[in-house]
Every structure is written in structure tokens, then in C-alpha cells.
Amino acid sequence: MSRPFLVLASASTSRRRILQQAGINPIVWPSNFDEDQVKAEDADTLVTILAQGKAETVAPKFAGQAALVLGCDSVLELSSGIYGKPETIPNALKMWEQMRGGKGALVTGHCLIDVLHNRRVVRAKRSTVYFANATDREIEEYIHSREPLFCAGCFTLEGLGGWFIERIEGCSSNILGLSLPLLRQMLKELGYSLSFTSDRKAYLV
């Protein structure tokens, strides 16, 4: 029987890096799923629908194979609403005006599809982010670096944005777009486990 393998239905370098640093080198197959077609007022509902849409788009490409297809999507939930990627400098400035000195919930939806056995698990994970009370100059310069424009929540924990994150509560990898502890639980629900080797590799079994 073929060894199961993981397919990441995302072009996110952050998600790929999380998996690689955890010993798994996934097959990367961006879904190109149209996110604009999905509307929901609840953050958990929104990200799980989007994650499922991405995974479902890619799964048929691996029909008949021992593929586990993972779709993810993240948003930042503030008291003022739900925010994804700002994409423009004006949008990013408006977001940081609300974020600085406060907190928000980074919510990531995960959908894992076992293609060969036609099974799936869908979950959402929340982590709380506390933002520094950054100055106008700091915010403007950070945003004009363009780093946060295409990041969910308009910040990166592992990049320049890390200067403005005072602390987090919850899963740290979830802040980066993929919760490893949750993924391990989801694999277990589908009947899989992880095996580790002395050369720091991880395999699905």
C-alpha cells in the first residue's frame, strides 16, 4: 500500500514553511479558489467554508491516490469586524488604526480531505493577538514596506510585524496560518499518525 502523503492546497509560503520545519515536505498545489464568492458574518464559519472550498477544489486532482489534501484560510476578528488581506495601503492603514494598542482573534479554518477513503475533517482554531501601541510613523513605515498587504490580519509574526506583537495566547503556528497541534488531531480523527526519523523528517502512517 502506498504511503499517505500531504497536499497543501495553498500558495502560502508561511504554511509550507511551517510544515517543512515540522519535518513534512508537502506537495504544494494552489487551489485558486474564488474567495470572493463566500460571505459569512461569523469568522469561524467563514474560514471553514473557505478552507473546505480550497481543499475540495484540489482533491479531485489526486483521485485514487493516498493523498491527504489540506486547505486553510485565516482572518483577523476585531471588535469592529472581520478582516482578511488588506491588499492596499489605505486599507492597511485603516486596519492598523483599529489594531494598535488592542487585541484581536486570528481565526484559521482547516479542512483535511482523505481522498482515497472520501473522508474529511473541518475545524477552526482561534489564537489571541495583542498589538503594541505603535506610533503613526511606525505604522506608516511598516505598511509602506508592503510586507503586510497580502497577509491575513495585516501583520506577520515572523517578519517586520513581529516588532508590533506584544504577546499571543493560544497556538503560535495558528497565527502563521496553520495550527500544527490541530492538524495532528485531525490526522488522528481520520485514522493517521505521524512517524519521525533521526534525520528530522516526519511521515504519515
Image: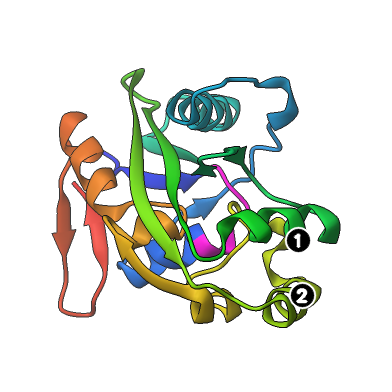
Q: Is residue 202 left or right of residue 19?
A: left
In which quarter of the view is residue 61 placed?
Answer: top right
Whether residue 182 can be seen here: yes
Q: Amino acid at mark 1?
A: Leu
* Mark 2 vs 1: CB contact within 8 A: yes
Q: Circle 2: is it few (<14), some (14-19), or many (20+) Cα within 10 Å? A: some
Closer to us: 107 or 134: 134
Quarter of the view holding residue 44: top left
Identified at 33% across, 64% down, the residue is: 168
Q: Is residue 167 left or right of residue 165?
A: left
Determine the secondary structure under disc 1. helix
Residue position for label 1: 93
Q: Which quadrant would the N terminus be assigned to in this image?
A: top left
Residue type pointed to by label 2: Glu
Magenta residues span 9-14
Q: Nearer the viewer, residue 50 or 162?
A: 162
Q: Position of residue 89 (x, y in %)?
A: 83, 61
**Residue depicted at 40% across the width and 26% down the height:** 115
Q: Position of residue 120 (x, y in %)?
A: 34, 23
Task: Residue 193: say if magenta.
Answer: no
Q: In the picture, residue 39 is in which quadrant?
A: top right
Q: Is residue 158 visible?
A: no
Main secondary-structure element of the magenta-colored stretch: loop
Q: Earlier in the sequence, mark 2 or mark 1?
A: 1
